Image (tube, helix red, strand yellow):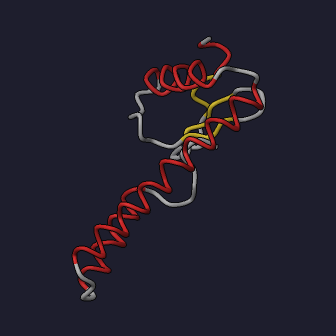
Amino acid sequence: MICGAGIGLLEVLTAGAVTAAAGIGALTLDRAIDRLLDWYSKTEQAQLDHWSKQLGIPRRDLGKAIHKVKEAANLRPNENVTIKPDGTVIDNATGNEIGNIFDEL
């Protein structure tokens, strides 16, 4: 699953706003948001590394193929998709198959 770490950027920022409203200082909130964004980015990179190895595709080529599939399906780059072991790409929002990684290589 790419970008499917279980927590979205909007959820992170919303949680930060709620925390700020609860009276936690801005500096602490900024640090917390920075840490969450860093974790989110590392998780996404780890997922790309995983699927690159599983599919036997160089990471750079995998990233480009995912971009092409999302673009063809009119998805934004930050929208989450699931990649199946056969390379099928599923739109997480709709559950629809939107393409295949191997068709874009």
In percent of the image, x 62 and y 31: which residue is there?
Answer: 89
Q: Where residue 86 sits in the image (x, y, percent)?
A: 77, 27
In percent of the image, x 32 and y 72: which residue is there?
Answer: 16
Q: Nearer the viewer, residue 27 or 103?
A: 27
Q: Quadrant of residue 12?
A: bottom left
Q: Where residue 5 sits in the image (x, y, percent)?
A: 57, 54
In percent of the image, x 48 and y 28: which residue is there?
Answer: 70
Is 64 above or below relative to 33? above
- Which quadrant, please, contains the C terminus? top right
Q: Where residue 32 sits in the image (x, y, percent)?
A: 37, 69
- Which quadrant, please, contains the N terminus? top right
Q: Quadrant of residue 47?
A: top right
Is 13 above or below relative to 22? above
Q: In the figure, is residue 29 to the left or right of 78? A: left
In percent of the image, x 43 and y 23: which residue is there?
Answer: 71
Q: In the figure, is residue 95 to the left or right of 41? A: right
Is 15 above or below relative to 78? below
Q: Where residue 57 sits in the image (x, y, percent)?
A: 70, 20
Is 81 above or below relative to 66? below
